[in-house]
Amino acid sequence: MPSSSTLLIQVVPWLRPMRCGVSDHAILLAKELKSTFAIDTAFITLNSNEPCDLPYPIIHCSPNRLLESCFLLSPTRPVTVLVHFSGYGYSPDGAPLLLANAIKELNRDDWFSVVVNFHELFAKSTPWKSAFWHSCGQKKIAQGVAERADLLVTSIDIYAKWLGRVTEKIDIKILPVFSTVGESVALVPIAKRKRSIAIFGLPCTRQRAYIELGYQNKILEDLGVEEIVDVGEECNAPASLNGIPICRMGTMAVTDLASLLSQIAFGYLSYPPLYLAKSSIFAAYTSQGTIPIISKPFLGEINGIKDGIHLFSAKTAKWTRASDLESCSQSAWNWYRGHRLYTHAEMYAQWLNQ
C-alpha cells in the first residue's frame, strides 16, 4: 500500500459478501472510496478468521489486539478507524464489552481518529425473549462506544436523537443506508414496467411478508398486481397468494436483481415505518424507483419519507391513479439519491481530508 495514499481502516465483525448487510455496506464503501476519492481501505475483523477473497489488506484478531492491529496497518502516519457497530455481530448477547474497551484504547491514542457507524443500537423485545434482558447492557455499551468516538454516523433520526441525548454530541451524521444491489442512474417509467410486486430478502423476512400480504389482499387488488416475484433462498413460498401467481426466482446475482427491480412496478417489505431508512430492502427498491409497499399506514414524515408520496400503504394504495404511481416512483428515487453510495463516501472523504 503506497505510503502517500490516504487510508481508512474499517472494523467489522466479519467479511461475508452477499451474506451480511454490514459486510456488503463496508465493502461497497471501500470500492467507492478508492474509485472516486483515491482512498485506500484495510479491514480488521474481530473474533472471526473466516477467509474472504477481497483485494484489501485484512487482519483477523481479537478485540484486545485492535490497537496493535491498527498500528500494523499504519505504522508511520495517523489514520481514521471506522467501526461498524452492530452489537450482535461482535457478541452473542449484543453487548460487546471487549469492543468498547478496544475503542477506549484507540481513543486514548492521538494516532487514530475514531468514527462509529451505528447500524444498530440495542434490542427491543418482550420479557419472555432474551433480548429484553440484555437490552440494558446493550444500551450501556452503545453509550460507552459513542462517547469515545470522534464522529458518530447512523441511518435514522431516532438513533441520532438517542445518541445525542446520551452523549450530548451535536454533530451526528444521519445517512439512510445505501443500496447494496446497485443504483439506477435513470428510471424506467412505471407505465412501461410489469405490474408485478417483488418480495426479496432472508427467508424469515419473506415469510413474514407473505403472512402480512395474506391479510392485505386489497393492496394487491388496488394496485392491479398481476404477479408476485419471490427472490432469495428457499423459504417455502406458496405457489400463489389470494389467486395471484408467485414466480420463484431463487437467489440472484446483484446485477440481475437490480435489472429485475428496475423493470417491475412494486416491491413489498414487512418493516416498521420508523426504521425504513435503515432497511437495505427499502434502499434497493427506492434506488431503482420501484415503489415500496407496506401494510401499516403512518402520518407525517419519518426520515424524510411520507406515506402516499414515497411509498404506498394499505390506506393510501386504494386512492392511487396512474399519475400517482409515476410521481411516487420518482419521489422515492429522488429521496434515495440524497444519500446514495457516493454521498456516503464523500462524507468520509471530507472527514479524512480535514
Image (cartoon, rainbow, N blue to C red):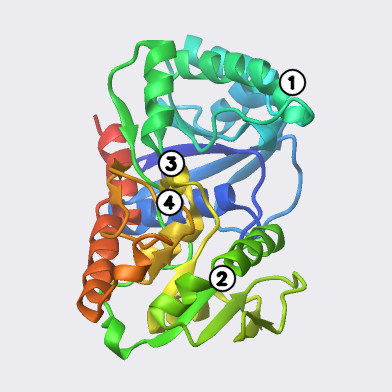
Mark 3 neighbour density, 10 Å: few (under 14) some (14–19) many (20 or more): some
Q: Are marks 1 and 4 in contact (CB under 8 Å)?
A: no
Q: Which mark is residue 29?
A: 4
Name which of mark 1 and mark 4 comes first in the sequence: 4
The type of residue carrying mark 1 is Trp
Q: Are marks 2 and 3 in contact (CB under 8 Å)?
A: no
Q: What residue would you read off at disc 1?
A: 133
Q: Nearer the viewer, residue 84 or 260?
A: 260
Q: Nearer the viewer, residue 354 or 167?
A: 167
Mark 1 neighbour density, 10 Å: few (under 14) some (14–19) many (20 or more): some
Apparent side of residue 304 relative to residue 153 in the rendered image (left or right) = left
Mark 2 neighbour density, 10 Å: few (under 14) some (14–19) many (20 or more): many
Q: Which residue is drawn at the image coordinates 59% and 58% (left, top)?
A: 54
In the rendering, at what x and y percent does residue 229 appear?
56, 80
Whole-number angstrom distance, CA of label 1 to CA of label 3: 23 Å
The type of residue carrying mark 2 is Ile
Whole-number angstrom distance, CA of label 4 to CA of label 3: 25 Å
Q: Which residue is drawn at the image coordinates 66% and 63% (left, top)?
A: 211
Whole-number angstrom distance, CA of label 2 to CA of label 4: 26 Å
Apparent side of residue 303 relative to residue 22 in the rendered image (left or right) = left
Does residue 323 appear in the picture of this structure? yes
Q: What residue would you read off at disc 2?
A: 199
Whole-number angstrom distance, CA of label 2 to CA of label 1: 33 Å
Secondary element at image label 2: strand
Question: Which quadrant of the figure has residue 55?
Answer: bottom right
Between disc 1 and disc 4, the foreground one is 1
Secondary element at image label 4: helix
In the rendering, at what x and y percent does residue 226 appear?
49, 88
Q: Which mark is residue 274?
A: 3
Q: Which mark is residue 117?
A: none
Q: In what quadrant of the picture does the C terminus appear?
A: top left
Name which of mark 2 and mark 3 comes first in the sequence: 2
